[in-house]
Amino acid sequence: TYTTPVNLTYESGGEVGFSVSYPDSDSFDSLDFERENNSDIYYRNFGSADNQNGDYIFRANASGEEAEDLELTIDTNGPSISVQGFSDDERINSDNAENFELELSDEYSTISNVEVVLEDSDNDEVETYEKDDCGSDECTFSPDIQGDLNHGNEYTLDISVTDEVGNTNTDEADFYYDNQYEAGSSPDVSPSPGVFEEAPGEFNVALQGDNDEESEVKVICRYEGAEEIDETGFEDVSVDDTTVDFTCDNSDFGMERKETLETEMVDRAGNSETY
C-alpha cells in the first residue's frame, strides 16, 4: 500500500507497452511511461490526480517477453475517527469519562499510531495517551482520562491517527467535566401524601432556583422499586428566588395499594439526587 506520489520504474532491453487496471475495473487501459535518456529504464510518477484510491494492476508488455504485472494499492486518506462515550461540547461525568473510546478504521491500510492529547482551557497539555500496536485496519482505543480530570473544568481532546503509509486524520472533542450534582434540591411535590380514591393524574415537582453554574435539570418520577412513571424535559433552574415547576404524568397508573413516590433530579451531565 502506498500514498501518492508513487514512482514506478521498469527496466527492459526492448520496447515496452504499459497498461493499468483501475480500482473496480476488470479491463486494462493504456498508460504512458517516460523512457530515461533512451536507456532501458521506463518511469512514471503516479500522483493522486491519476485516479481514485484502491487496488491497481500495472502491466508491462515488453517485446519478446511475457507480460509482467505489478499489483499495488493507492491510499491517500487518513483513518476514520469515531468518538464514543460523549459528544463534542457536552457536559460529562465520571461515567462518560470511563466510557470514552475511539473507534478507528482505514479502508486500505493498517493503523500504525494513535495519539490523544488532553488539554485544559488554557490549551496547556494535561496528559498524552498513545497507542502504537493496532496492527489492523480496525482498532479501538480507550485511554483512561478520568484520573486526569478535575470537577468544574473545561477540557479538549486533540486526536491524531496515522496509517502505515503516513496518512493522518485529526479530530477534537471539547467537554466540561461535571461530576457533582449541584443544582436545585429539596423538591416540593404535590399533591401531598394522602389517601386517594383514584391515583392522581399528575404530580407537580417544584424546585427552588439558585445561581449555580449548573443551570438545567430534569425530573424523573417513579414509585419506589418500580419503573419510572414519567420523565420531564430539562428546565433552567439557575435563577435565584424563583420556583421552577416540573410535571410528571401519572394518568396511566391505577393503584389500590400504598405507594411511595420517588423523585430524581438529573443534571445535564447525568449527576443526580433522589428524594
Image (tube, rainbow, N blue to C red):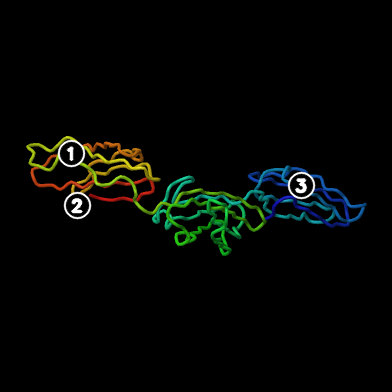
Q: Is residue 118 left or right of residue 245?
A: right
Marks 2 and 1, the one that precedes in the sequence: 1
Residue linked to disc 3 = 19
Quadrant for residue 193, please give it: top left
Which three-letter amino acid code belongs to the residue tagged 3?
Ser
- Give me the residue at 22% from left, 47% from top: 227
Q: Is residue 205 left or right of residue 130?
A: left
Q: Is residue 138 left or right of residue 48?
A: left
Residue linked to disc 2 = 225
Q: Please tell me how crowded label 3 is: few (under 14), some (14-19), or many (20+) other residues with Cα within 10 Å.
A: some
Residue linked to disc 1 = 190
Q: Residue 256 in the image: state x and y as whole percent.
A: 8, 43
Closer to the eye: label 1 or 3: 1
**Label 1 to label 3, Cα distance in Å?**
82 Å
Q: Quadrant of the N terminus?
A: bottom right
**Label 2 to label 3, Cα distance in Å?**
73 Å
